[in-house]
Amino acid sequence: MYFGEIPKLVMSNFQDKTVIITGGSRGIGKACCLAFARAGANIAFTYNNSANDASLLGDEIKKLGVGCIPFKANVRDYNRCRDVVRETVDNFGKLDILINNAGITKDKALVMMPIADWTDVVDTNLGGIFNMTRAAITTFLKQKEGCIINMSSISGISGLPRQTNYSASKAGIIGFSKSLAKEVAAYNVRVNVVCPGYINTDMVNALQENMRNEILKNIPLKRMGASSEVADLCLFLASNKASYITGEVIKIDGGLAV
């Protein structure tokens, strides 16, 4: 059986599209950048600290025959977020998709948590989504078309101990997204939330083996997820095949939060 034409069909869905992905230089963000680039989209992505990773990724994306702009940007800075959107539109002529992926963790029991750890996580994870979305929303409303995908977590649904700051920020993303989805639906702008579980990223891979084994016991599929699997879900949500989906919160966690 021959499936040679299928990649071409998938690619045509995103040719001439432009996507901004925050936190794009590593992990899930990097997987999203490569997935959308392979599907024909022009890529703008932000990074904060990993300049070398960003440079290597930018070169890799350009070899795929699409445009790419890496932006050094802290999503906590609204003015910088506005610059990212403006320069992306100036370079590529439009903006079709925004994937808010940038986030941090500073896990600690609440009784021991410094106020700075609360502020840093909430301002980055939730405040960063406000900043980028606020910067991009006018473009989407004017063109009466757009897709926003916000990266939350199963921690925002179920809550995890020692993650009050992270869980609160990720739960806030869900509320933000549901409200915005209703607000902009009349303009043909869709807003959805992706909630990954344990994905094989640097953060998860840094866990001790005994902790990883305990986690696997609670995952019905008995494995960690791959960043590429999260990227594939984002591809679907951004595609025309998901044109009637908005305001949804979709878990991708191997059944962990069932």
Image: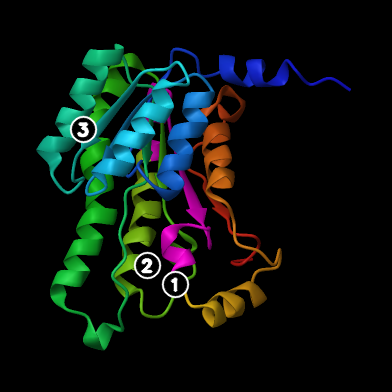
Q: What stretch is highlighted in magenta?
A: 181-206
Q: In this view, does 24 lie to the left or right of 244?
A: left
Q: Which colour scheme is used?
A: rainbow
* Amino acid, disc 2: Ser
In the rendering, at what x and y percent does residue 188 appear? Answer: 43, 23
Q: Quadrant of residue 229?
A: top right
Name which residue lies at 71% across and 20% down: 6
Q: Earlier in the sequence, mark 3 or mark 1?
A: 3
Q: Which residue is under mark 3?
A: 135
Q: In this view, does 214 lie to the left or right of 165?
A: right
Q: Are marks 1 and 2 in contact (CB under 8 Å)?
A: yes
Residue 253 magenta-drawn?
no
Q: Is mark 1 on a helix, strand or loop?
A: loop
Q: Residues within 10 Å of mark 2 (few under 14, many from 20)?
A: many
* Amino acid, disc 1: Gly
Q: Which residue is under mark 1?
A: 159
Q: What element carries label 2?
A: helix
Name which residue lies at 64% across and 66% down: 258
In the rendering, at what x and y percent does residue 57 appear? Answer: 38, 35
Q: Which of marks 2 and 3 is nearer the N terminus?
A: 3
Q: Which residue is under mark 2?
A: 167
Extreme residue toward the bottom, this view: 111
Question: What separation in Å lies between label 1 and label 2 (alpha carbons)?
Answer: 6 Å
* Amino acid, disc 3: Ala
